[in-house]
Amino acid sequence: MVEYGSWLDTGDLVGGTYVFTGLSLATRSQRMLLARLEDQMDRHPSRFRILNRPSRVPDRVGELVKATQGIRGVWPLKDLPTAVRYPAVVVCEDVIGSTDSPVAANNDELAEILSQMLLCGFDPERMFAMEVLEPLNASGRPMRSAVLVHPASEAHTVIREIVHRAGLEMARVELSMRNGHPAAWRIDDGPLAMLPIPGSPPNVVEGWMREMAALDSLRTDERTPLDIERLLAPIP
């Protein structure tokens, strides 16, 4: 694991498999800078394997729109309330998780939810509305399950395709079944999403460790220098 920016201190990278995380919540400038790093790594294909390419990952709303392919409605705030289909929730995403509103059944309830979330300080740039297709649990929340998807996992082909459509190779997907087809609720490419869920039994953690070892198929001790000046050139 390499923290973004640490390669600026060392000026090089050790060979291996790199998973870019949190890209869907990065700014345009941040993604462009990391795409430059991706380009330099691609010049040494025998040393680096890249999962979740900065040049291909859209923002979080764009991920869901691509992943759902019309199965579930997903709308940015600028399209509300005219485009929304009910029932719906308002979601605010950040790098360590997400916040879902109570389920809204009509425009009045949606307007009240938006007002409360904005007054509480939620960032409108990271908020969107999403159609609810799932049954609700006893707390009135949509029911869904989660699975970590990556090239070494045993996730079903259809779920892998959801992640692929979102421009990713590795992410945690929250989903439910809709008429026999998985409907993505959330696609999380943040760093914490790549780890086992806290409280997972030992066999799950051990399985995750084996899968991560299988992913790291190019690990070497050879270090590759980076063109730091080119990486940090002004972004247009």
Image (spheres, rainbow, N blue to C red):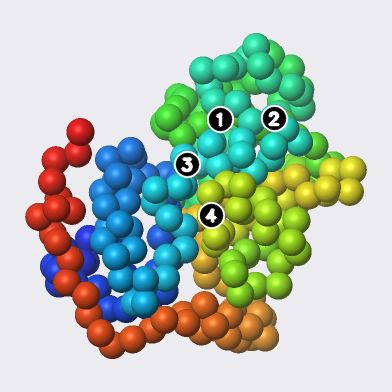
Q: Residues within 10 Å of mark 2 (few under 14, many from 20)?
A: some
For the residue pair 205 and 215, the one nearer the viewer reads as: 215
The disc labelled 4 sits on which kind of residue? Answer: Leu
Q: Would you place residue 111 above or below residue 184 in this image?
A: above
The disc labelled 1 sits on which kind of residue? Answer: Phe
Specify whether residue 174 is in view: no
User: In percent of the image, x 41 and y 60: which residue is there?
Assistant: 20
Label 3 sits on residue: 58
User: In percent of the image, x 27 and y 52: which residue is there?
Assistant: 36
The disc labelled 2 sits on which kind of residue? Answer: Gly
Q: Earlier in the sequence, mark 2 or mark 1?
A: 2
- What whole-number distance in Å separates the C-alpha atoms at marks 4 and 1? 20 Å
- Image quarter hosting the N terminus: bottom left
Q: Residues within 10 Å of mark 4 (few under 14, many from 20)?
A: many
Q: Picture coordinates of residue 175 (x, y %)?
A: 72, 51
The disc labelled 3 sits on which kind of residue? Answer: Pro
- What whole-number distance in Å separates the C-alpha atoms at marks 3 and 1? 15 Å
Specify whether residue 56 is in view: yes
Label 4 sits on residue: 168
Label 2 sits on residue: 73
Q: Residues within 10 Å of mark 3 (few under 14, many from 20)?
A: many
Label 1 sits on residue: 128
Q: Picture coordinates of residue 187 (x, y %)?
A: 59, 50
Q: Earlier in the sequence, mark 2 or mark 3?
A: 3
- What whole-number distance in Å separates the C-alpha atoms at marks 2 and 4? 20 Å
Q: Which element is circle 1 on? A: strand
